Amino acid sequence: MTTTFKTAASGRAPSPIEPLPHQLLAALAQHRMATTGQLHHLLRPDAARQTISTPLNKLRRKHLVDYTVLPQSNRARAWYLTSEGARLTRDFPTLRGRSAYPITSATAASLKTPHTLTVVRTHLAFVTDARKRGDEHGHLDWTPEVSHPLSDGEKIITDAVMHYTHIGDDQRTKLRAFVEVDRATMSSERLAAKLIEYARLWSYEPQPSGRQRSRQPAVPGAVWLRWYPLFPRVLFVLTGAARYVLDHRISDLQAMVAQHPLVATLARQVPLGAAVLDDLERQGPTGNVWVPLAGGEPRPWTEL
């Protein structure tokens, strides 16, 4: 199946702006799944809702996307790529090198819907705030399910890696964060143990073995330097339970920082914070909603 998009009127130079159908496919490839409303807010917040729903339905007729109907939602749709859509987007320049975990069936979509859509919801809180502030953070600056190696053949998979550019009066500051979205579906102890995994990633320096060791010396430095100039800050976003339950889970994260020696060392070098998703949506991520896990008063995520 061959699919083409019209990018410019006949006789004119191509536009540097990707057409909306292309953006919709890229957004679904990036985020795995999103509702019509989420895609509307992400890509065309100032346009009518039909601006998004019309091309989505055209893409569905071309068998590039499909949807599942969310329960108890007045027939709201959550969209995902079909196998053909996933194959097509692998060739998009903006998506080269990205991890591919497509959701390509209604069954898989129904299983992943709650967590995946909550991760998108978290992203939208940052997108909304960035627009208000004049910062740079768009639909491709949030990469879900990013894997990094740990020692002993293990790996850590973060819910999302965020890239964000803060625009000041006379400078641009690039910020990065590992984002963990907690829906209170795992024990508080397991959630806090994620901090140990991040501390291991921060300290892990792989050593060459066998033939590689004899050929050349080891490249010094931690493994994360392959991807980041600075270790990203670690942000926990909590939802899915009563406020007092979420507060207790944040306290358990703080206790892990205080009690685990490697995590405590990480906290002296890397900003660590936790916030409630409802607060992010009401006040914005740059409000005083983030609890520093090493202690202190709530503050913006940029000031952890």
Image: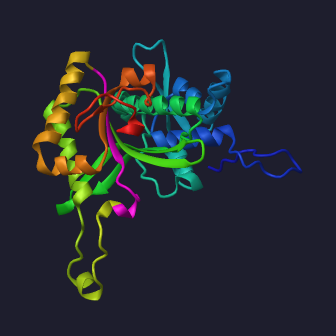
16 left or right, relative to 197: right
User: In this rendering, would 52 be left or right of 196?
Assistant: right
Q: Quadrant of residue 187?
A: top left
Residue 160 at x, y percent in the picture: 38, 42
Residue at image position (19%, 31%) is 186
The percent position of residue 209, horizontal first and vertical second, equals 21, 78
Residue 170, above or below 241: below
Residue occupying the point 54% across, 39% down = 139
Against 15, is 105 above or below?
above
> What's the residue at 28%, 82% (across, down)?
217
Q: Nearer the viewer, residue 42 or 105?
A: 42
Residue extending furthest front?
170
- Image check: 176 left or right of 197? right
Q: Is residue 89 magenta?
A: no
- Viewport quadrant of the C terminus: top left
Hey, which quadrant is residue 178 in on the image? top left
Question: Compared to 165, does 71 lie above or below?
Answer: above
Compared with 48, 159 (above or below) is below
Q: Which residues fall within the magenta stretch?
A: 225-240
Task: Say if the magenta span includes residue 230.
Answer: yes
Between residues 161 and 144, which one lies in front from this camera angle? Answer: 161
Most extreme residue toward the left is 259
Residue 90 visible here: yes
Q: Residue at x 59, y 27 (%)?
A: 40
